[in-house]
Amino acid sequence: MISKPNIAGLDLPHLDGEDKLDRVLSSALKSRDISPPFPLSPSSYWDASYFNLPNVRIFQDATEEEQSQILGLCSQGLLEEAYFIEKAGVGYMAKMVLLAETIEERMLYALFSADEATHLAQITPFVSIEETVATDNPFLRLLADLVETQDKIVLLFVLQIVLEGWGLSHYRNLAQGCLNSDLKEVFTGFLQAEARHHATGVTLFDRASISAQSKDAIAQTLALFLQMIQMGPQSVVAAIERVKGHLSRSQKVRIFAELDTENHSGTRLNLLRSLMRSEGAKTIVQQLEERKAFQPFSPDNCV
């Protein structure tokens, strides 16, 4: 019995490096001038200011070793998220090949799938291999569920218009703040492809007829995603707690305040709202505004 295909593929394992298929893949990647870099310690990728940690008292009072561990966890979290996004992107683009309505659209998505496969190969060497099989990250669970949907309009708007548009800004910021030249080059290299993916999503969405059911599904999905942004830099607080030990509610509230969570989230929410400017998205934005989905949470509500 053939099992149902895992389109998002977040839990797909890697082959052993000696496997024949892996050798063929390595040869194909070399033909694209992709060779794995030699990664450094994760704490060497972004400094404390990138995560706004210089304003956090518990971080400043930590030992040098503890600070290094917190930075390593924060950096590894960013890398793992990028890894899983690109991993899901390979499956998503392959799915869109099958959903294409013209040969040109099918060809585009086949090329986009190759883009995502290339990005995945480039980011993988920087991620701890033990962490690349499963994840309990709420955003990635949402992403995996979304990729499985059969509604092409939902896929186009949420994944290509909103998330790929957000990814452009996110990867640009990662590149600008990155201290490692190899990794900086990787993220910078993502930008041109991400711009094409986003622009294609906008073009196809603007041409489509959008049902009320699709609009409701988009609004519900985006409300869940936006709530994750509203809750501020949860991964940074989690990294601090993992290194420093249990934090009380009042300690967490204070850390979120020191991380300037409302400005941190507000900037991202404004960017995401600006990506939803298609004519067919007006009622979607209206639904989200009614839910106050573009308003950042206070430090007290982030805990």
Image: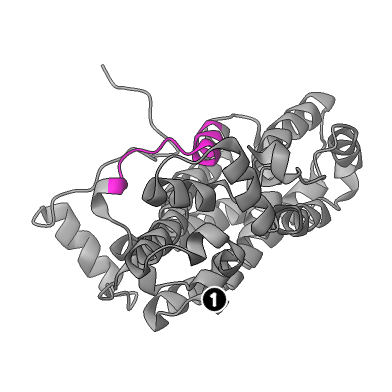
Q: Secondary structure at mark 1?
A: helix
Residue at horizontal 34 percent and vertical 74 percent from the top: 32
Image location of residue 209, percent across then percent down: 82, 37
Q: 287 or 9: nearer the eye?
A: 287
Q: Which residue is mark 1?
A: 177
Image quarter in which the N terminus is found: top left
Q: Residues within 10 Å of mark 1 (few under 14, many from 20)?
A: some
Residue at horizontal 60 percent and vertical 52 percent from the top: 255
Q: 244 or 20: nearer the eye?
A: 244
Q: Is residue 202 left or right of residue 252?
A: right
Mostly what secondary structure, the magenta segment? Answer: helix
Q: 88 or 109: nearer the eye?
A: 88
Q: Name the amino acid, label 1.
A: Gly
| Residue farthest along the left direction in this orientation | 18
Image location of residue 180, percent across then percent down: 40, 79
| Residue farthest along the top direction in this orientation | 1
Residue at horizontal 32 percent and vertical 58 percent from the top: 127
Q: Is residue 147 left or right of residue 231?
A: left
Q: Quadrant of residue 281?
A: top right
Q: Quadrant of residue 275?
A: bottom right
Question: Is residue 183 at all visible to an observer of this figure?
Answer: yes
Q: 117 or 16: nearer the eye?
A: 16
Image quarter in which the C terminus is found: top right
Q: Which span is picked out in magenta? A: 131-145
Image location of residue 52, percent across then percent down: 60, 66
Residue at horizontal 82 percent and vertical 45 percent from the top: 295
| 136 inside magenta stretch | yes
Q: Is residue 12 left or right of residue 161?
A: left
Q: Is residue 190 above or below residue 264?
A: below
Q: Is residue 290 above or below residue 243?
A: above
Question: Is residue 100 at all visible to an observer of this figure?
Answer: no
